[in-house]
Structures are given as C-alpha cells and as structure tokens.
Image (cartoon, rainbow, N blue to C red):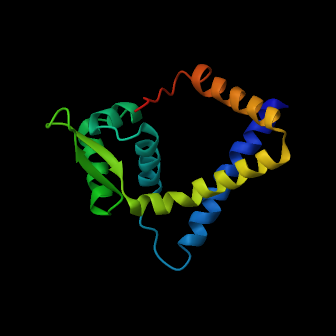
Amino acid sequence: MLDDSFAQVYGKFKLHFYQEIFSTFQDREASLTAVETFCMEVILALKEPTVNEFASFVRISSPNAAYKINSLIQKGYVEKIQSPNDRREYHLRPTQKYLDYYNVSSSYLKSVMDRVKGRFTQEEAAQLDRMLQIVSQELMPEVELKRR
C-alpha cells in the first residue's frame, strides 16, 4: 500500500508538470526538448555543476555533455560562470529564463506543501519532513547530491 501511495503522489507531481508545460506551449513552439528539460533538471539539482560533473552524473561523455550544454546556452537557459577558486573551471548556472520555465513545477510543489501544513498538525508535518529527509539522505544512496 505504501508503494502505491508514494507512486501515486510522485506520478501526480509529474503529470501536473506535464499539464502545465503543454498548456504553456499551446500557443507557441516549445523551446526545450524533453532531453534538454531533463538536462536542466539535473543542472538545477546538482547546484551549479561543472560540465564534467554533469557528464559524470548523467553518465555520458564530456563531448556529448558539452554539446548538450552548448545548445542550452544558445537557447538562453544556462550560463557558464567562471570559478573564483580555479579560473580554468566553469560552473553551469540556470538562467532566469529557465527559472521562470521551471517555476511551473516549483509553484505547484509549494501549493501542495502549503496544503500539507494546513491539513496536518505541526507535529505530523514535522514527522513527514523527518521521514522524507531519511528517505533522501539514507535510503537513496544512488543519487548523491553535493551540498554547496
């Protein structure tokens, strides 16, 4: 039952995102392909990775990653920021254009979390938070995210 409940919640978040993306592009051509959207999701989650960190995380070659990144730069969704520590290194940062695009997903997440806080007691919400932190930090070792 827990498996089904979690899959249903996760599925609803994905489906809501797809609904919003399709309605956003109803009157104009989509500017990000599905693969580019996934790339941007990874870049955002990795918190300003280098091209090599991105390539390593998604398990593709550095030239393939560079090709995908250059396409995203040309479309205005990502920018390269020179590292203050190592001037040879560049980090990938989503632009405001992408953040506006991404807000479709994050605003729904905020709405649902506001509903959770309104529906459950503070203690119940805190317990859910603790459980989700354990799932993220301990039970999903395959997806390690750096804390910047």
Q: Quadrant of residue 141?
A: top right
Residue 111 on image: x %, y %: 70, 55
Extreme left residue here? 88
Which quarter shows the C terminus? top left
Q: Quadrant of residue 105?
A: bottom right
In this view, the residue in front, 88 or 62, is: 88
**Count of numbered marks:** 0
In this view, the residue in front, 39 or 119, is: 119
Which quarter shows the N terminus? top right
In this view, the residue in front, 77 or 123, is: 123
Would residue 104 be found to the left or right of residue 92 on screen? right
Extreme front residue here? 122
Would residue 133 be found to the left or right of residue 77 on screen? right
In this view, the residue in front, 80 or 16, is: 80
- Residue beneath the point at 14% across and 36% down: 88
Q: Quadrant of residue 62?
A: top left
- Residue beneath the point at 20% across and 38% down: 84
Residue 69 on image: x %, y %: 30, 49
- Residue beneath the point at 84% across and 39% down: 121
Residue 21 on image: x %, y %: 57, 64
